[in-house]
Image (tube, grey):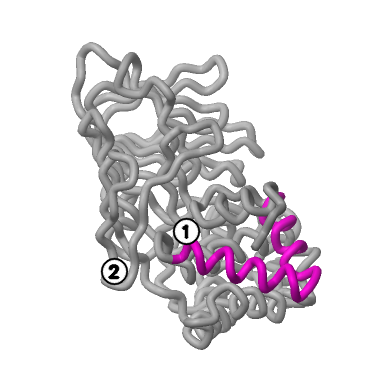
Amino acid sequence: MITDTHIRLLILKFMTGELSDAEAAGLAAWVSASKENAEAYRLEVEALSAQTDVSKDIDRFWNRVQAGNRDKFAKKRPARRLYLLAVAAASCAALVIGIAAWRLSVSGAGPSPVVAEVSAAEGDTLSRAPEAEVTAGRTDSGRMCYATGRNEKRRVTLPDGTRIVLNESSSLTLSDSFNECAREVTLNGEAFFDVAKDSTRLFIIRCGRESYIVRGTSFNINAYSEDSYSVTTLHEGSLEARINSDIIKLEPGEELRVDEIQSSISKQKVSVQNSTNWINSDIMIFEDTPLRQVVNCLSRRYGVRIHVQGEICNIKYTGKNSGRNIGDVFRLLEVTSPVPISVTEYEGEFYISRNK
């Protein structure tokens, strides 16, 4: 039995999906420090497993450890990950280890995204693939939060009736006073919003230094915090974007692109269908997108690190990605790139450079 209150809290946060990257690294170090710790961890997880999908949460845990500590775990990552999986989920070790090894394979096929259904009531169970269940969680401050992992999508209905689809590796957090005064949420990632009309309360979305104010509107926002590039596409209604001191109003069929590296803000007419193609398909569509942003999207989708070298990071790329493995994606990218490029691999990471 674990008597260390701090470690028990970390395990509980891990089981509920609220573990930070730093906490994940600390918990991993504690578990691997001794056989006694590993056995205590296994028993604690088993005690909670009746209420939690252990294998799925363990997989998410190691994804976060890898993302936040890739350099530290680079050489030992596969063995250490499989070890903890075996310790924490002994009853289904063969299945989980098989999945883990498949996901760690760079050349392996990527799974098709899964779309889940969730309502705003805390603790509601989502209906997604028959073998999986997901519940809404809360942040450390108690705010309700919905999140997706890699190759996962979720449909969310908020208390005011607003319907949202979250793309992979995204999170949506509701303010403490949501549905009381202004309806305010924070988005990290990509989501399609169909905002319920309410003439008395604004709907406000915050994405880093950007904010969007609406009343009854449908639109798509792509704004991952780790990126320096965001795209917002308005389908219906009206949308007001506030970026620092700039106020930009969008009309249906218009798209707003914010490029922090280039210090540029642009608005243009587009085909709105392309912005939401991701909801019902795993095909990624790029239109005049900087190559560095294309690489960010591919890294999230396939779970690998990709680096763009030199001035080609800002070249504009247009194309579709329907590859089932990263090798096919790179071959297509080399053929369709507007400038000649080559892709090389070194210690599990990929480097894109311009051919001379």
Q: Is residue 60 above or below residue 217?
A: below
Which span of residues is magenta-colored?
A: 22-49
Q: Is residue 183 left or right of residue 335?
A: left
Toward the viewer: 289 or 167? 167
- What kind of element bears circle 1? loop
Disc 2 marks a residue whose amino acid type is: Ala
Toward the viewer: 314 or 149? 149
- What kind of element bears circle 2? loop
Quarter of the rendering containing residue 132: bottom left
Q: Residue at x 72, y 74 (%)?
A: 77
- Number of numbered callouts drawn: 2
Query: Tags 1 and 2 in contact by the CB under 8 Å rule?
Result: no
- Mark 2 = which residue? 129
Quarter of the rendering containing residue 294: bottom right
Q: Residue at x 58, y 62 (%)?
A: 61
- Mark 1 = which residue? 149
Does residue 34 show up magenta in the picture? yes
